[in-house]
Image (cartoon, grey):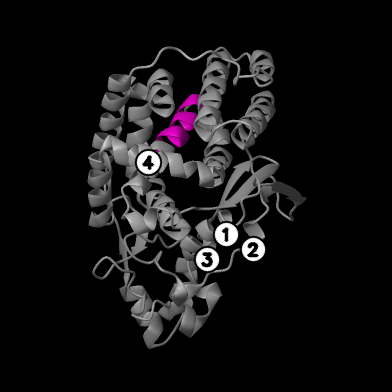
Amino acid sequence: MKNTFPSYYKNFKCIADKCPDTCCAGWEIVADSESLARYEKLTGDFADKIRSCLSVDEDGDTVFTPVGNRCPFLLESGLCEMYIKLGGNSLCRTCRVYPRFTTYFGSRCESGLSFSCPEAARLMTESSEPPAFETEEIPAAPVPTDIDPEMYFTLLEVRKSAIAIIRNRQFPFEKRLCAFLRLSGAVSTALRHSDCAAARQIASTDFFAVQTSPHSVSRAKRAQEKYFSDFMKLEALDPEWTSALGKAAELPADAVASFLEKSQEFEWEYERLTVYFIFRYFMTALFGGNVLDKAKFAAVSFIIIRQIQASLPAESRLDKYARIRVMQKYSKEIEHSEQNMKSLEKTIHTSKFYSVENIINILEN
């Protein structure tokens, strides 16, 4: 099987108790069947503790019952008691794999790191160079799939063009996002008619040359207000996240403008974030949804994230760590909540406020 992954992927190593966050709090940790079978065979007091901490949730999954919103094995030191006593192989699949993710496409797969992990986010934004990808053979059998091969290779070609657009530093980042949205909209229309040939031809179009429609400041303001309203209605793991959204939504226009001017110096951070979104989600249109919705999600995520960054205290706005922390918290709150992702997918697909025209209007204002 061929596996494609970002160049920084293999450099990840959990920093354990040195991590400024923890993946063992706030999230439900599901125990996979193989791990459960191992736990059943264990003996001794600690084995009894493991089994006593397991319960079945409302979805029928076996989970580690949280204690005060924390995994029962998370020590005050920030280390994992199970890891200390039984070693890394004792962990359930979720804990062994995170923050890595892999998506399978038959005889090919793609692996990456989630922005929700602080150390992964640091690695992903360590360099200002355009992010690169590698492909290698791995000893794994193909995963059965009913994916249309022509559609798969068409989307690969389109995604390559999309990433090239986002990496094109001849243009301001907002203009790159607008070109990416136009590309995705045109391709989505072609694929809705199963016209892969047209989609591949569209992928070679110069979307930077497309003329911009007249835009409206008031219309952009209404759409952005709707975005923040929708995000504040989502499930929140941390009350501070809701507070951050509210503060960003009320930020005066002059404060935003000042930050936007400064943000041109670190546009490459947004470039890396958006390439991450494209790499992680664009090809999943093969399993449902469409490429335009994936593109809208990336663009709206950028709008929300940058506005929150602009609302940071003055001494933090120009601090790279503080900016990346916002990206990491966004990923943790949004991407790692199935409920939030489903809600956003539906809203982005159906609400007129999330039209390409409205998103571009915000980006160009």
Label 1: state its secondary structure: helix
Amino acid at circle 1: Leu
Which label sits in the foreground, 1 or 4? 4
Structural distance between the alpha carbons of marks 2 and 1: 8 Å
Q: Are marks 4 and 3 in contact (CB under 8 Å)?
A: no
Q: Residue 96's mark?
A: 3
Amino acid at circle 4: Ser
Label 4: state its secondary structure: helix
Place of residue 258 in the rendered image (x, y in percent of width and height, measured from the top left): 37, 41
Q: Nearer the viewer, residue 109 or 235?
A: 235
Q: Are marks 2 and 1 in contact (CB under 8 Å)?
A: yes
Q: Is residue 292 magenta?
A: yes
Point 63% across, 37% down: residue: 167
Q: Quadrant of the C terminus?
A: top left
Question: Of the residues under marks 1 and 4, which one precedes in the sequence?
Answer: 1
Place of residue 22 in the rendered image (x, y in percent of width and height, measured from the top left): 39, 67
> Would residue 227 appear left or right of 17 to someone viewing this image?
left
Structural distance between the alpha carbons of marks 1 and 3: 19 Å
Check disc 1 and report the residue beneath it.
123
Q: Is residue 8 magenta?
A: no
> Would residue 47 appear left or right of 134 to someone viewing this image?
left
Label 3: state its secondary structure: helix
Q: Nearer the viewer, residue 11 or 207?
A: 207
For residue 76, which quarter of the picture? bottom left
Question: Of the residues under marks 2 and 1, which one precedes in the sequence?
Answer: 2
Magenta extent: 290-301
For residue 223, which quarter of the picture? top left
Q: Are marks 4 and 2 in contact (CB under 8 Å)?
A: no
Structural distance between the alpha carbons of marks 3 and 2: 16 Å
